[in-house]
Image (cartoon, rainbow, N blue to C red):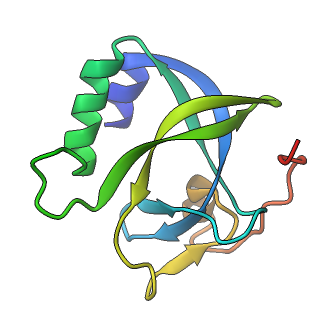
Amino acid sequence: MARRLRAAGEHLGAGAVRGRLYDLGPYPGLVDPRAPREWVIGDLYRLATPAATLRLLDRYEGAHARARTPKFMRVERIVRLSGRNVAAWIYLYRRSVAKLVRIRGGDYLCYVTLGGLQIEFRGANLET
């Protein structure tokens, strides 16, 4: 799916969205933040054919209308990208995170690369 997404749009760079990230095993799950300084890092794309690509992503994420108990829900959020705010679609995890490991640094790629080592994100001031 990552290859299809790269082919379906232009990579704009790494962005940050308010939220908490959890380890779901083979992939992460993003939920709304509990505190103002909780951020999740991810790649942002401008889609060439948004409607078609979002339908494909909705099916892949199990967020389509026919899913009986969807794990994810597509919502629009403000993403911080290169010092500016942009509106973007993200997928929120809809199930309980009570027994899951929180990825405190908010960066799944870093978490996986470091074998689950927890690194707190202390990047640029994202509040402005």
- List x then y, in percent, for residue 102: 57, 76
**Left or right: 74, with 44 as reference point:** left
Q: Residue 14, relative to residue 64: is it above or below?
A: above
Foreground residue, 126 or 117?
126
Q: Which image quadrant: the N terminus?
A: top left
Going by the picture, which residue comes out furthest to the bottom? 99
Total marks placed: 0
106 to the left or right of 75: right
Residue 11 higher or lower than 31, as above or below: above
Residue sitting at x 55%, y 65%: 21
Rendered image quadrant of residue 51: top left
Q: Nearer the viewer, residue 121 or 65?
A: 65
Rendering quarter of residue 106: bottom right
The image position of residue 72, as x and y in percent, is: 32, 56
Residue 49 locus on image (x, y percent): 33, 13
Query: Residue at position x 65%, y 28% from top?
Result: 86
x, y percentage for residue 82?
78, 28
Q: Residue at x 39, y 70 (%)?
A: 24
Q: Quadrant of the C terminus?
A: top right
Q: Is residue 68 above or below residue 64?
A: below
Name the residue: 44% across, 62% down.
29
Residue 99 as seen in the image, left or right of residue 113: left
Quadrant of the rendered image containing residue 104: bottom right
Horizontal relation, residue 125 to residue 7: left or right: right
